[in-house]
Amino acid sequence: MGRERQGGMAVGAMAGGISVRSWPALVERVLAEANRPRSEDHGDRHWRAVAAAGRMLCERVPGSDREAVMLFALLHDTRRENEYSDPGHGPRAAAYLRRLVADGAVRGAADDIDRLAHAIARHADGLLDDDPTVGVCWDADRLNLWRVGIRPEPARLCTGAARGRELILWAQGLHETAPTWEEVLAPGFDPRSVGGEDPEWDLRWGDQGNDDDWPRGMRP
Ligand SMILES: [Fe+2]
Ligand SMILES: [Fe+2]
């Protein structure tokens, strides 16, 4: 498994793309159908914070599909059944995506839907992927680990863009400053308008202390 796509445009990932019939209607529907939309750690606020991180990363990762990343943010944790260990929540959310596609709420070429379904299904497995869209999806979620007291580890991020100290520290403030869906989905949204370093955090850069929070064996 590759660690990083070095330079160059990932043209394959750009082909086709994914589209949403109506974002406002989809957000309303997903909020109504999600298992735990009000969850502090895994509910709507987290999804919006992931979307904001996704916007920041899409600017920096050539070939990433922004529409797919926004769908990942909205859908990836909608099928959680609890706040702790729920290894089936990714696959259940991927099945939910398939239902939205069958309904016509989401459209896209089969390859693009398959890629997004993979990103959603495996997002909690601690994997790395060199596909730009999958990598941005997983990194956008992992940059938000701060909210549960975990400092994102550069070695566990897929894209070179996410691994930089500046972006990791920027993500500290994301959960508290998460934009609305209307804001984050707007073409002109500036991700620098949210996030920011949180001086309350006293973890020194380089501390190692998060290993138990990740699946065993994933530390490169
Ligand atoms: Fe999750
Ligand atoms: Fe998440």
Image (spheres, rainbow, N blue to C red):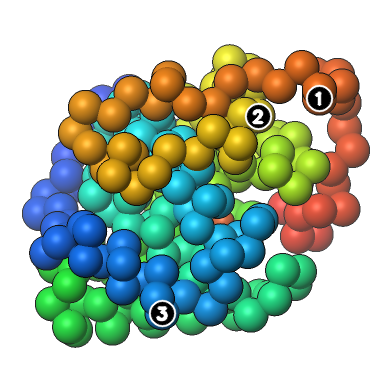
Q: How far is disc 1 from disc 2 in space, using C-alphas?
A: 8 Å
- From this viewpoint, is residue 1 visible? no
Q: Quadrant of residue 27?
A: bottom left
Q: Disc 3 or 1, which lies upstream in sequence?
A: 3
Q: Give amino acid for label 2.
A: Gln
Q: Quadrant of residue 173?
A: top right
Given contact means CB atoms under 8 Å apart, are the residues at marks 1 and 2 in contact? yes
Label 1 packing within 10 angstroms: few (<14), some (14-19), many (20+): few
Instruction: State left or right for residue 179 relative to residue 126.
Output: left
Instruction: State left or right for residue 65 relative to residue 158.
Output: left
Q: Disc 3 or 2, which lies upstream in sequence?
A: 3
Seen from the viewer's position, the closer of residues 189 and 107 is 189
Instruction: State left or right for residue 210 relative to residue 196.
Output: right
Q: Which residue is mark 2?
A: 172
Q: Identify the secondary structure beneath mark 2.
A: helix
- From this viewpoint, is residue 218 visible? yes
Q: Give amino acid for label 1.
A: Trp
Given contact means CB atoms under 8 Å apart, are the residues at marks 3 and 1 in contact? no
Q: How far is disc 3 from disc 1 in space, using C-alphas?
A: 35 Å
Q: Give amino acid for label 3.
A: Glu
Seen from the viewer's position, the closer of residues 42 and 37 is 37
Q: How far is disc 3 from disc 2 in space, using C-alphas?
A: 29 Å
Q: Which residue is mark 1?
A: 201
Q: Which residue is mark 3?
A: 33
